[in-house]
Amino acid sequence: MTSIPLTVYGIPNCDSVKKARVWLAERGADYVFHDFKKEGVPPQALDFWLSQVGWETLLNRKGTTWRKLEPSLQASVIDSQSARQVMLEHASVIKRPVCVLQGQVIVGVNPPAWQNVLG
């Protein structure tokens, strides 16, 4: 469908990431998958995501990883910088998938937004 470089960031066994990858494959979209577990979170990419969508959108406070963090660590997340540190140390607290296309960052399962940027 598109030759525009799309990058999908996430964890392969995450249901939301699986949904995104199936949706993209069904539409013939070319994309690169970046596995947080194997490749880590690129700090510069994280900084870009934070600048585009904000830490409140990017930080998944409903997930298992967040709930397993020490309460003191959870309480320390009060701004973009503190959230960034936790996301770098605990990649699974990042809401998934993070899709980046044409400078746009889409977080979570959002087919209408994907369709808009894919054209």
Image: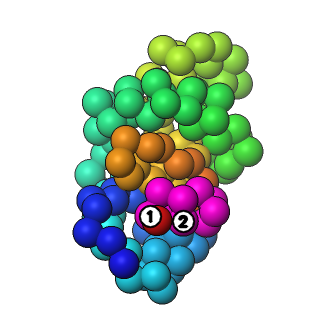
Magenta part mainly helix, strand or loop? helix
- Which quarter of the picture shows residue 65? top right
Instruction: Return the mark for residue 118.
Output: 1
User: Which x, y percent locates residue 91?
Assistant: 45, 43
Assess disc 2: are there few (<14), some (14-19) or many (≥20) residues with their C-alpha within 10 Å of its C-alpha: few
Residue 86's place in the image compared with 38, above or below, is above
Tell me: 112 left or right of 12: right
Looking at the rendered structure, the secondary structure element under dot 1 is: helix
The residue lying at 67 percent from left, 50 percent from top is 64
Q: Is residue 12 left or right of residue 4?
A: right
* Amino acid residing under circle 2: Gln
Residue drawn where x is 46% and y is 82% of the image: 27
State the CA–CA distance, disc 2 to disc 1: 5 Å
Q: Which mark is residue 78?
A: none
Q: How many neighbours does mark 1 have within 10 angstroms: few (below 14), some (14-19), or many (20 or more)?
A: some
Q: Quick check: can you spot residue 17?
A: no
> Residue 59 in the image: x percent, y percent?
60, 35
Secondary structure category for the residue under label 2: helix
The magenta stretch spans residue 114? yes
* Displayed quadrant of residue 11: bottom left
Does residue 15 show up? yes
Residue in the picture at 69% in, 17% down: 75
The quarter of the image holding the N terminus is: bottom left
Q: Judge whether 78 appears above or below 68 on screen.
A: above
Q: Which residues are magenta?
A: 110-118
Q: Which residue is mark 2?
A: 115
Residue 114 percent across, percent down from the top left? 53, 61
Magenta-drawn stretch contains 119: no
Marks 2/1 in contact by CB < 8 Å: the verdict is: yes
Q: Report the amino acid beneath label 1.
A: Leu
